[in-house]
Amino acid sequence: MIIEYVGVKEINGSLVVIDGVKGVSYEEIVDIRLDSGTVRQGRIVQIEGDRIVVQVFEGTRDVSLENTTTRLTGHPMEMPLSPEIVGRILNGSGKPIDGLGDIYPVTKRDINGTAINPVSRIYPRNFINTGISSIDTLSTLIRGQKLPIFSGSGMKHNELAVQIVRQAKITGADENNFGVVFAAMGVKNDVADYFKKSFEEAGVMQHVTMLLNLSNDPIIERTLTPRCALTVAEYLAFELNMHILVIMTDMTSYAEALREFSSSKGEIPGRKGYPGYLYSDLASMYERAGMIKGSTGSLTQIPILTMPNDDITHPVPDLTGYITEGQIVLDRGLQNQGIYPPVNVLPSLSRLMKDGIGEGFTRADHPSLSNQLFASYAKVIDARSLASVIGEEELSETDKKYIEFGRQFENTFVNQGFDENRDISQSLDLGWKLLSTLPRTELDRVDDELLDKYYGK
Amino acid sequence: MANVIYGINGPVVTVKGATEFSMMEMVYVGKQRLVGEIIGITSELTTIQCYEETTGLKPGDPIEGTHTQMNLMLGPGILDNIFDGIERPLAEIEKQVGAFISRGSQVSSLNTEKEWDVTVTAKVGDELKGGEVYATTPETQIITHKLMVPPLLSGKVVEVKPDGKYRLNDTIVKLEDTYGAVHELTLVQRWPIRTPRPVRQRLTPTVPLITGQRVIDTLFPVSKGGTAAIPGGFGTGKTMTQHQLAKWCDADIIVYVGCGERGNEMSQVLQEFSELIDPKSGRPMTDRTTLIANTSNMPVAAREASIYTGITLAEYYRDMGYDVAIMADSTSRWAEALREISGRLEEMPAEEGFPAYLPSRLSEFYERAGRADVLSGFQGSVTIIGAVSPQGSDFSEPVTQNTKRFTRCFWALDKALAYARHYPAINWMDSYSEYFTDLDPYYAENYGKEFVEYRNSISALLQEENRLMEIVKLIGSDVLPDDQKLIIEIAKIIRVGFLQQNAFHKDDTYVPLEKQKRMMETILHLYERSKAVVAQNIPLKRIIEAGLFEKVTKIKYDIPNDRLDMFDEYIKDIDDKILSILG
């Protein structure tokens, strides 16, 4: 027997309160039909006796206290899944919008997923060659990792993401078991178009599943988009054994949607008005990356977020950094110098790198080389700040060499063309070439054996 | 009247009307029997925090009380195992439900089928007090598990079973208390997680926890039974430092709590620890380790409990007379779990949304560390090393500040050092240890009075360098006189050659104290000799050109840990070269 409830008790932002509801379960999905005939979906976010609070995904525009009937569906938010989902374009809550019809579900999954048992995880150590020197050498991407790009408005994070997708697909995985899941949250229509066009140009569109919640789409739907995308990705990776790269942009818009929802629910705000559970909430998505026993697939995440006012201590990048396994930080100064990709290598980091590089993975000298490049480049920054006080002329000989090294490093190592694909040994050799411009005694992170082999060669 | 669910909001579930539940009682919620705990009672409403996801719960679902507090099963089988935040064995859950954790899993914390080789030490007629040992069993190849009378029980032994193989729930000793009641003692006991286990007497911590990490052992030592905090923004190496300590410190037992951290990190710990061989025992590290993994996407209330679960396990092994170290990574996630639950309860927030009871909870936790005469008659200790993840890398935030008040060691990780890949990125200016006075006699006795003197000289040099760098930043190093330049050069050796330590180098990952001392000695010897050169107005450049500084910087790699005699050659080489410079 299906009971329909007429009218609502209260409307507040995207939340409606309904009284006298029986047999309801927490996080259940409800259909809300307006008198005009439109049907909206909502989720139960709070229960108090027979009073429920429903979050309406499409917003509460046109809803009045009397013009709705609400029906319980009896299950939490689920995503229909089938192998055909690859290559499709869906809206932010997982419904097809490419005009190719519905997806016939082979199976359905709760979009919230469940936590992977830490015992069942395989520790990721397969290196992904992205062909980008600054990433491959210094913040290596590993299959099964979650490595976000911290960027700012107007920076070239989208280009970088596209370049990674285009170049990373070549190594390791073959054509058939490689796939991309792209989740757009509150991005501009142009940006979504750019990704679509780029994927088509790169010839990977048939491997891409896109979920689009554009900036004019309902905010609440935005909080579902990454979860739907990850449910698709988990299905493809862990059940169909594909290697899936998930690109989620822009996580800041997601967090803002969450904040809006939280405040309309009247929750106590934490830092900058974001809800206190922002960490847990972000973690429930980021932690869905990885590799598990019993599956040969992998789920790698590249979330992109724009740091408001380029502030890395803002709650969204801050909490993200605590959950993800490193970060790639883009720098406006570098971008203004015309350097692409404008990766600021010092704050960038890959935590899984140490076990995925070196002998047997990339090249034996890789760990020492990257260490030395970091150390030397850190000294460049010191030398520059000194030069800004006393002038470059007054610097000691060594410091002058560092300044020159820094210039070369940025212009030839970090800087590379959008179409330039450098393999790992090319990048490493370039690193050695740059280090060789410094006096040998300055290279204190590398042992003599490696220096003899590579220094000045 | 049956207790049924009234309201649900995230992990918080409420029951309407008066109930017979007591505070902190463990309950089963709903048809799936999710584990929960009573956290608030009024005559109108009882509040429960649920340790599992509440999706799908319905008002009207039953709630079942257990009449006990949230407690742990304590007995053999804890080591070489991995649990979630409320002591459910993750490997067993995997066997039952596969790679994804489902809710309401009903598994026993410890394996009740496994047979243990028990040696019964109690005899009929013995008077046993709470905490005293009645039997032992080899839990792993290196750790003997002592079975102890539960702390609150005592009496006369009226029956014992012979030595042999027993399962966890088999009765091996019967104890008659003063009221004539007979208690059956098995291989397990239970203890509530939020209550500290009692000890006979607390002792002053006078023995250092030796970690093999130079910056810690030398400059900022922690004692066995001490507390230390490692605060640092993301990417500064908190987890890496915790891993290094867990691997190398000389505690008997390690309890590693992954509290709201990354899943991949836990799988790394699992893999590394089983591959890593403890040099002292020749057995895998897992033989002395127990892991508690509550990753960031696992339920938030269980994250709050995981810290208490960890410390209770630690105390249990302390009571057997072991030195236990507990690594909590990270206590900030625990504090955030408190905040999240507090927010759901609509409590009045204090600083930054954290509840007003944050400091008292933190101090309760850290006070459970300590060295003590335990009830079994041995001495044991619990050392707490807690990582702190300050929001926005700002050490003035509430969790860092309050942690600072209750810990005596503060290892401040520094972003600038981490950017330059100087690891461990412990900033020597911001960090401190309050254990010097307690520990100095130990150092003096075991490693000579010089050890303390060397350390003080090293600190003084670093302090002096810090002052000089202020000037250098303004006008460059070229204008400094040679004696000050020398300090900068020597401090550089200390920084690069001593403080910085390579966790991936076979010799450098763990350095015995004797070598640490010899390294300091060599560096300071070089300093003293070079001072003589500079005093004669011979340019410092001459020493640099002789390659001495470079050579001493690389001592850490060039002298293996078992060839400490090589230091004599270095000292001699310094003397020779300096003599030839002096002419």
Image (cartoon, rainbow, N blue to C red):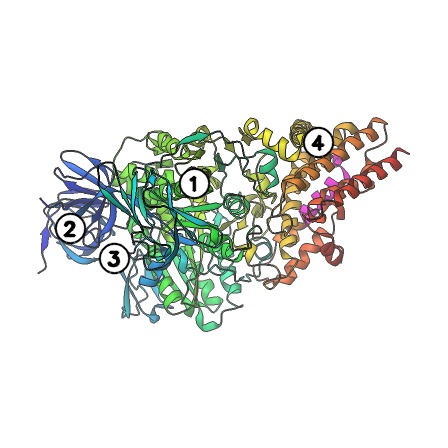
Q: Mark 1 points at which residue?
A: B318
Label 1 marks a residue whose chain is B
The quadrant holding residue A228 is bottom left
Secondary element under disc 4, as helix, strand or loop, is helix
- Circles 4 and 2 on the same subunit: no
Alpha carbon distance from label 4 to label 2 = 74 Å
Q: Mark 3 points at which residue?
A: A77
Q: Mark 2 points at which residue?
A: B61
Spot occupied by residue A391 in the image (x, y as percentages of width and height) = 71, 34
Q: Is residue A13 visible?
A: no
Secondary element under disc 1, as helix, strand or loop, is helix
- Circles 3 and 1 on the same subunit: no
Q: Do the residues labelled 2 and 3 touch (CB within 8 Å)?
A: no
Residue situated in front as seen by the camera: B376 or B505? B376
Amino acid type assigned to the residue bearing label 3 in the image: Met
Secondary element under disc 2, as helix, strand or loop, is loop
Label 2 marks a residue whose chain is B
Q: Which residue is rendered at x = 70% and y = 39% of the image?
A: B518
Amino acid type assigned to the residue bearing label 1 in the image: Arg
Q: Can residue A343 be seen in this view?
A: yes
Alpha carbon distance from label 1 to label 4 = 59 Å
Q: Which of marks 2 and 1 is nearer the N terminus?
A: 2
Spot occupied by residue A295 in the image (x, y as percentages of width and height) = 41, 67
